[in-house]
Amino acid sequence: MAARLLRACLTSAVQLRSSVWSRPLQRTVTTLKGIPTDEEQATGLERRLQALKHGKDPYSMLKPKEYTGTKEDPHIVPSIGNKRLVGCLCEEDNTAIVWFWLHEGPSQRCPSCGSHYKLVHHELPH
């Protein structure tokens, strides 16, 4: 009984081995479009630097656009949530910062100087 079982296992192993060696291995590096370029394969920091070259601002490094701070043209504050803590320097040479919570919705005024701020939803650059 044990000899018959051993013989059956050996025959199936030989058949398996012969079928593996008879088929050619198919390994391809290309896609339907061909070999991908360096720009298509870029990930991480390299991809974000490419976005910067195309005019996008992946790290919010560029200087924000100037706004007048009026009710019609409020300062835009990007946020990934529905509220954000904002600090306003009411005068250019002032050393005290006025902090207040800015909520999503219509523009809000700074309690000290009256500048208007508006919270705008912003997606992360992932």
Image: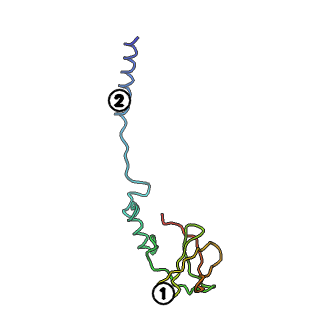
Please tell me how crowded label 2 is: few (under 14), some (14-19), or many (20+) other residues with Cα within 10 Å: few
Q: Amino acid at mark 1?
A: Asn
Closest to the camera, between mark 2 and mark 1, is 1
The percent coordinates of residue 31 (x first, y second) are 42, 54
For the N terminus, which image quadrant? top left
Q: Amino acid at mark 2?
A: Arg
Say above or below: 85 vs 36: below
State the residue lying farthest toward the right.
106
Q: How many marks?
A: 2
Residue occupying image coordinates x 48% and y 63% = 126
Cα distance, mark 2 to mark 1? 81 Å
The percent coordinates of residue 100 (x first, y second) are 57, 76
Residue occupying image coordinates x 37% and y 17% = 6
User: In the drawing, does residue 2 fall left or right of residue 94?
Assistant: left
Say above or below: 69 vs 77: below
Say above or below: 21 vs 99: above
What residue sits right under mark 2 in the picture? 17
What residue sits right under mark 1 in the picture? 94
Please tell me how crowded label 1 is: few (under 14), some (14-19), or many (20+) other residues with Cα within 10 Å: few
Which picture quadrant has residue 48? bottom left
